[in-house]
Image (spheres, coloured by chain):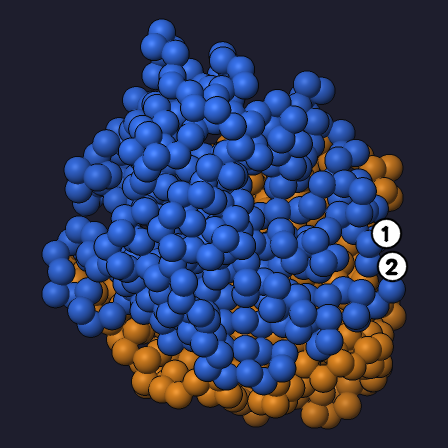
Chain colours: A blue, B orange
Amino acid sequence: MSTASLPQALPEHRTVRVDHDDLIAFTAQVFADRGLPPARADRAAHALCHGDLTGPRSHGLANLTRLYLPLLDEGRADPSAEHRTVTDLGAAVLLDARGALGLWSASEAVELAAERAGRHGIGLVSVRGATHLGCAGYHALRAVEHGMVGLVAANCGRQRIARPPGGAVAMLGTNPLSVAAPAGEHPPFLLDMSTTAAPTGRIRQAAREGRTLPEGLLCDDGGAPVTDPGAFDAGRAHLMWLGGEDGRYKGFGLGLAVEVLAALLPGAGTGPHPEALAAGGGPSGRDDDIGFLVAALAPDALRESFDSDAEQMFGALLDCPPTDPAEPVRYPGWHEYHRAQERRREGVPLEASLYAELADLAAWSGLRFPAPVEHGAGEGL
Amino acid sequence: MSTASLPQALPEHRTVRVDHDDLIAFTAQVFADRGLPPARADRAAHALCHGDLTGPRSHGLANLTRLYLPLLDEGRADPSAEHRTVTDLGAAVLLDARGALGLWSASEAVELAAERAGRHGIGLVSVRGATHLGCAGYHALRAVEHGMVGLVAANCGRQRIARPPGGAVAMLGTNPLSVAAPAGEHPPFLLDMSTTAAPTGRIRQAAREGRTLPEGLLCDDGGAPVTDPGAFDAGRAHLMWLGGEDGRYKGFGLGLAVEVLAALLPGAGTGPHPEALAAGGGPSGRDDDIGFLVAALAPDALRESFDSDAEQMFGALLDCPPTDPAEPVRYPGWHEYHRAQERRREGVPLEASLYAELADLAAWSGLRFPAPVEHGAGEGL
């Protein structure tokens, strides 16, 4: 790793590639400097960089200075908190994360769930007192490393940004949900989604890049479509639910299902709460006391031939004739897997502005930031 | 119960109300005549009539002569099959339903899951060899009767009607997903949804009623919106995924997540399979060897005060100020609960054409069909 500054001539939205291992090492060092034990810092770094490695950059390193360092610096996350076991019934465990960094807590919870699933067929770890976990899919994929199906969902604590259909007050967060499964020799299946039509990170990423949004993600007070991403943080637009006008009760229902499973079950903070009613129509509450649902299901404990069946099933999907020969049929997780392979080899693309921001952070922290491995021309990110 | 024929003057789309208990007794008798043991016939009748009782009529008695009796009469469902336990790990059980009627199997599976959850905090019952379960929500609600959270999902066996995004061949079914939870003194939370934008029953119901569909449910080969529900069974339109154009990978991903959890896990028939590739672009395969995922989560085994927290959370949602004072904010399950209350009291509305069909079935079977309790003028069904 060598100190590097951004070539001045690079336009802001160009990308710069940085070696993956160097990026992890840098990020882990930033976390370690904030008091995370080394193994925990390394795990949190992998979880955070997963967004940049696989695609949803809105959940990647762009959040280091915007979300995670402020959480630690304000004392809202505890770098060295140990999880407390509230209840242990064997197959099901209730943990209090006590404000540990969610980037690490969620992976710990998946490891515990997988260990229990190996014995009981299913392992459920219900977590309260947590902080943000980053990409839910990163953690769900850890179950796949054990040959299991992983399920990870999180609410946003008491942070309220999405309104119930027909409601004038924000009541819920973006409530992500992820399911990952082995697919034999094919890339793992990975669904990783917000239950709102888009996560806030996608909206803000578009605002930073000066892009217009497609219709269906934001609407104004009267329900009319909004395509200017800047309108969201200006309070002139709200997140819509997955499903659009006709299907919004499904998206809202999925968001509420996550609230029940991830937060109500363990007794974490919830968006819908009498205190929300005292707030105005805009966002309210803080993303403290987040709840997770983490589950691992162990197919091999239940039956034989799961792996070959999974390989055959996902293989059949990949073999589905496409309507456009130039666009083969893929399933969620396929592109992310191949993107990660390529980026581990060729470097992880960071927007020039993010590169500069992280280089500044490095300088300010007395750390060295990795030099670019290549000046990428972007790749249609 | 008294024999009744439809008053001749009643227009076809008017509704006729029939006493709920009489309707259950009639339906149970029809099933018992096909060889279902009495308690099983009664359970299946409740599951089937739930659609008419709570609202999604597309999953109710309209399917008796279209789906369930043909399954029994063709020997594709076995009226008296006993479930076989393939694996029992305590918290997780794998069952082979051996072709028993899914309307009954799914409720049995929920009872077993709840029993296991009481001991282990979570109970998972993974089922293969099943047939259609009707409304997934009916079964998920049974967990709520035990004070638990219920989760029920099903694939459609080898029946393929929905195409992967960009695919030219049908690969998946409508793959319903349901989550139900206690809400204290408020009606239970109940999400009950297809992962396609609409279930086939809704499309066919609209076709029977001569209604046009909103955009976003069906599209043609080129992806253009189709609003004529008749185009679906004519092979000129396909089901779209929940989420519309921008979010279709989420809907498809949810459909696949259900396929993994409900069918791949227990080793049931799956939509994506090499045999699908031999079929043309239209629907293929049969809805045999369906798989279920049934889970119960026992909050009271994990922590205290779940019920009061749930009541407070759902109460806050109901108290959310509405944008239109005439349309109070509700959550999924609220309307269904109140509709069921009213219909248990006032009678279950059946379309006149369905009433006539069931009266014919009764006459043909030597049974008596309940007389109308009222000639309803419809209620905006």
Instruction: Pinpoint residue A268: horizontal percent, then vertical percent.
Output: 36, 71
Instruction: Pinpoint residue B341: horizontal percent, then vertical percent.
Output: 39, 83
Q: Secondary structure at mark 1?
A: helix
Q: CA distance from mark 1 to mark 2?
A: 5 Å
Do residues under tags 1 and 2 come within 8 Å of each other at their CB atoms? yes
Quadrant position of the C terminus of chain B in the picture: bottom left
> In front: B88, or B202?
B88
Residue at (61% x, 47% y) in the render: A190
**Which residue is at the far front?**
A366
Q: Inspect the image, locate mark 1, and give the three-letter code of the amino acid beneath it.
A: Ser
Reading the image, the residue beneath label 2 is A305
Q: Inspect the image, locate mark 2, and give the three-letter code of the amino acid beneath it.
A: Ser
**Mark sitting on residue A282:** none
Instruction: Pinpoint residue B28: horizontal percent, then vertical percent.
Output: 67, 86
Q: Output the chain of dot 1.
A: A
Q: Secondary structure at mark 2?
A: loop
Residue at (83% x, 37% y) in the render: B277
> In front: B5, or A263?
A263
Please, is residue B136 above or below residue A185 in the view? below
Q: Quadrant of residue B137?
A: bottom right
Reading the image, the residue beneath label 1 is A308
**Would you say residue A60 is visible in this rendering?**
no
Residue B95 left/right relative to A181? right
Q: Callout 1 environment at 10 Å: few (<14), some (14 to 19), or many (20+)?
A: few
